[in-house]
């Protein structure tokens, strides 16, 4: 009978039991029970399955569920469990702490499926690690702790990596170590069933625990972000001349007579972009965006080029910059300093009054910047500062024309659906010893937005040029957000009483614009903007043009920062090489661009992670001196285990549910906590009074305590929420009896460095 059932379903696909019984002549009262018994046995053997409509079908996979093997990247949570990231199209798989084996965060692992996902119940697939395909962690950095508990080792190091719970023992070395050192070590042996610790060899002493700035250096070195350059790279940089020669100017468009100037932050040293503007007779604007021609000095496959590719990007942390290129280039001949000739690549665009580019020229050029302007001075000029208007009289008209053009470009982008993720960003001010002395909001005036507008226009212009030329190219893409992420945001927004038009599968950028306009300047608007940003996919580099969702741009690339981003350097190289391209070069770029795009995206994420870790560390260090003080805050996120709250200067911390004064129920639908007796409700966007109880610099974590205040909101307690008295030994918080999702579904997997969603989404552009 088994063969007949299989044969019928292979031929007819799905079938209900009654039709199957009739087809196999098993519908009678005597024979039907034996059919049902056979179907039941085949289902338990994994040969058959019932779908959601009750139809019977053959299972597609002949293997048992626990034999299905999948390879992916393991992402650990410091609590011991983790997730397997397969790819962007697949949901992550949960791996319990007892199924992790000896996998470490970032390892490529092979797992077997223990339990398949159930979308109706909202549970993720569960897996067990069975093989480690590739180790991601090869070196570690940490403070040395001298110890003689193992005779073959000098001691062990304490790493900032909270996802490493095992000790890291250092093999004995001829060097005399005092226990004050911060070491970089290479891993020789990983934890296994034979021993539960790492064995490592000393590679370098990167400093001592009381050195100025050692805390930041420890973070950077642990992520292989190295400040020093190899000797061959420095030698090549030293060989670059201090100024262009006459030969260097041959074949370039001479723009030295144009009124060109730079606008940057007051502390910027690598001035890699300059602008000029003209009002044309037809009423259009001529905008020139001139970028330092770094690729002229950094030849492909040179030592400089290989090092820049390996770094991918400059890294900006609180008290330092780790540059992609040596300072001799970035602060010297590739910096567009005033009153000196500099080689550039220029995008010169004619832009009409609707913000559309009507014509353009992309060319090698030479400029001579007239002024080194700061954002602060330009903002004050726009606001009518008489002293500055007099001092910079030659460019006053240009500044006002630029402001007008910026508004046109901004309106054009808004009309086509661009999203403005203008979220609050912190600026951490440190003293000469690297100690944080203040945390303030980073100012972003008209001058900053104006220059950004011009850079966006140039990036789009260059990308469109090469897309239409159908040449191998590297694009900056930002794909449409995933439906499940948008649904989470839509649910989140509803908590604020704001409806988003459309569904997660069918929502337009215009609908998101309307939403952002509704909540602008409303309580909780910053929280909502951040949540919308987190629902977006991360922008990345690709050899394929998929457009930029956030900018609503059909074409986009990175052209404007070759000093600090390798993809921009590559774009400049392509602009030059495509003037006289050979078939061999075309094939070469077809091969290398995908690899460069993948590597650059990965290195960018590494830089973002480093910046976030340092920011969290410095914010916690800053708050250490304020323990015991009270603050007004806003609830950023409500989760089962507590509230994440944000101070006005962006500092975030956790109020754990166990510190609240009574038993609180978590409402998953409204994403809120409600006190069982008082009826007090905590929701995202709500103001709250808090007291700082702990700031842990090493963990980058801040803990607050709730304080009763006039901000408190009380709602009627639902009858079904009341519960019977429970023994005192039970905790003050528990989930509902019929939990739809396992506990791990409430954990943010991709938020902050500690798995609790502290970090901010960034760099969608």
Image (cartoon, rainbow, N blue to C red):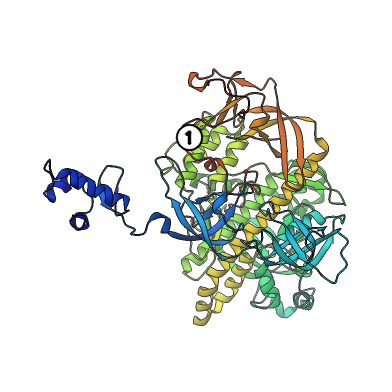
Picture coordinates of residue 258, whole percent (x, y): 70, 63
The answer, for residue 324, to whether it is visible in the render is yes
Q: Quadrant of residue 560?
A: bottom right
On screen, residue 194 above or below 496: below
Is the residue marked by circle 1 packed among few (<14), some (14-19), or many (20+) residues within 10 Å?
A: few
In the figure, 54 relative to 47: above or below?
above
Is residue 69 depicted above or below 415 in this figure?
below
Along the line of sight, the residue nearer the viewer: 34 or 91? 34
Examine the image and state in which quarter residue 445 appears.
Answer: top right
Left or right: residue 251 versus residue 518 is right
Residue 75 figure quarter: bottom right
Q: Where does residue 285 sit, x and y in percent of width and height?
A: 60, 54
**Observer-nearest of 483 and 640:** 640
**How far across and down, in percent of the image, does residue 329 sit?**
76, 69
Q: How many marks?
A: 1
Image check: 301 left or right of 718? right
Q: Is residue 67 left or right of residue 389?
A: left
Compare residues 88 and 460 and report the one nearer the observer. Answer: 88
- Secondary structure category for the residue under label 1: loop
Task: Say which residue appears at 37% left-offset and 56% top-offset.
Answer: 64
Residue 324, position as x, y percentages in the image: 71, 65
Quadrant showing the N terminus = bottom left
Report which residue position mark 1 lands on. 739
Q: Residue at x 12, y 44 (%)?
A: 27
Q: Nearer the viewer, residue 64 or 405?
A: 64
Viewer can see residue 254: no
């Amino acid at each position: 009978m088994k063969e007949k059932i299989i044969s019928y379903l292979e031929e007819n696909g799905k079938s209900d039991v009654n039709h199957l019984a009739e087809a196999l002549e098993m519908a009678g009262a005597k024979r039907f029970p034996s059919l049902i018994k056979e179907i039941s046995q085949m289902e338990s053997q994994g040969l058959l399955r019932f779908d959601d409509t009750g139809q019977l079908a053959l299972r597609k996979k002949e293997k048992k569920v626990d034999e299905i093997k999948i390879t992916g990247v393991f992402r650990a949570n410091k609590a011991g469990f983790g997730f397997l990231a397969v790819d962007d199209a697949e949901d992550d798989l949960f791996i319990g702490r007892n199924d992790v084996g000896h996998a470490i965060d970032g390892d490529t692992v092979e797992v077997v499926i223990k339990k398949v996902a159930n979308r109706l119940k909202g549970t993720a697939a569960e897996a067990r690690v069975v093989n480690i395909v590739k180790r991601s962690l090869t070196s570690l950095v940490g403070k040395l702790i001298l110890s003689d508990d193992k005779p073959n080792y000098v001691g062990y190091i304490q790493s900032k990596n909270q996802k490493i719970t095992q000790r890291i023992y250092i093999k004995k070395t001829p060097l005399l170590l005092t226990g004050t050192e911060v070491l970089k070590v290479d891993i020789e042996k990983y934890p296994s069933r034979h021993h539960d610790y790492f064995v490592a060899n000393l590679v370098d002493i990167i400093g001592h625990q009381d050195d100025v700035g050692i805390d930041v250096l420890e973070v950077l070195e642990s992520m292989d972000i190295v400040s020093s350059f190899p000797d061959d790279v420095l030698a090549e940089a030293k060989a670059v001349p201090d100024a262009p020669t006459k030969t260097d100017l041959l074949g370039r468009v001479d723009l030295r007579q144009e009124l060109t100037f730079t606008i940057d932050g007051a502390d910027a040293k690598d001035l890699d972009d300059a602008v000029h503007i003209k009002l044309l007779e037809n009423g259009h604007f001529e905008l020139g965006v001139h970028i330092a021609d770094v690729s002229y000095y950094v030849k492909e496959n040179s030592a400089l080029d290989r090092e820049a590719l390996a770094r991918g990007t400059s890294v900006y942390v609180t008290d330092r910059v780790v540059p992609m290129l040596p300072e001799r280039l970035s602060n010297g001949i590739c910096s567009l300093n005033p009153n000196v000739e500099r080689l550039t690549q220029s995008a010169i665009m004619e832009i009409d009054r609707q913000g559309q580019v009507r014509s353009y020229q992309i060319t090698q050029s030479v400029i001579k910047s007239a002024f080194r302007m700061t954002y602060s001075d330009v903002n004050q000029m726009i606001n009518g500062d008489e002293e500055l208007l007099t001092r910079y009289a030659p460019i006053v008209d240009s500044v006002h024309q630029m402001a007008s053009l910026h508004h046109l470009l901004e309106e054009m982008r808004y009309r086509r659906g661009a999203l403005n993720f203008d979220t609050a960003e912190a600026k951490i001010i440190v003293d000469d010893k690297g100690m944080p002395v203040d945390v303030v909001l980073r100012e972003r005036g008209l001058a900053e937005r104006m220059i950004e507008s011009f850079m966006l226009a140039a990036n789009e212009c260059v990308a469109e040029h090469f897309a239409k030329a159908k040449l191998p190219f590297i694009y900056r893409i930002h794909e449409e957000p995933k439906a499940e992420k948008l649904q989470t945001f839509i649910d989140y927004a509803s908590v604020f009483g704001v409806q988003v038009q459309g569904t997660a599968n069918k929502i337009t950028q215009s609908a998101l614009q309307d939403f952002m306009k509704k909540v602008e300047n409303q309580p909780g608007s910053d929280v909502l903007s951040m949540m919308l940003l987190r629902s977006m996919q991360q922008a990345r580099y690709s050899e394929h043009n998929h457009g930029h969702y956030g900018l609503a741009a059909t074409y986009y690339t990175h052209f404007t920062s070759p000093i600090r981003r390798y993809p921009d350097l590559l774009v400049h190289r392509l602009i030059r090489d495509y003037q006289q391209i050979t078939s061999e070069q075309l094939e070469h770029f077809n091969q290398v661009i995908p690899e460069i795009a993948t590597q650059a995206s990965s290195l960018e994420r590494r830089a973002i992670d480093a910046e976030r870790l340092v920011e969290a560390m410095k914010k916690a260090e800053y708050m250490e001196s304020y323990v015991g003080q009270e603050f007004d805050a806003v609830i950023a996120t409500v989760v089962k285990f507590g509230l994440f709250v944000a101070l006005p200067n962006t500092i975030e911390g956790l109020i754990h549910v166990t510190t609240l004064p009574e038993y609180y129920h978590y409402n998953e639908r409204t994403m809120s906590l409600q006190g069982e007796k008082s009826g007090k409700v905590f929701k995202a966007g709500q103001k709250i009074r808090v007291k700082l109880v702990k700031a842990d610099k090493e963990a980058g974590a801040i803990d607050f305590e709730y304080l009763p205040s006039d901000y408190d909101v009380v709602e009627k307690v639902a009858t079904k929420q009341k519960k019977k008295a429970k023994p005192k030994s039970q905790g003050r918080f528990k989930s509902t009896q019929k939990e739809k999702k396992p506990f791990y579904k409430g954990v943010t997997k991709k938020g902050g460095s500690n798995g609790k969603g502290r970090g901010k989404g960034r760099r969608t552009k």
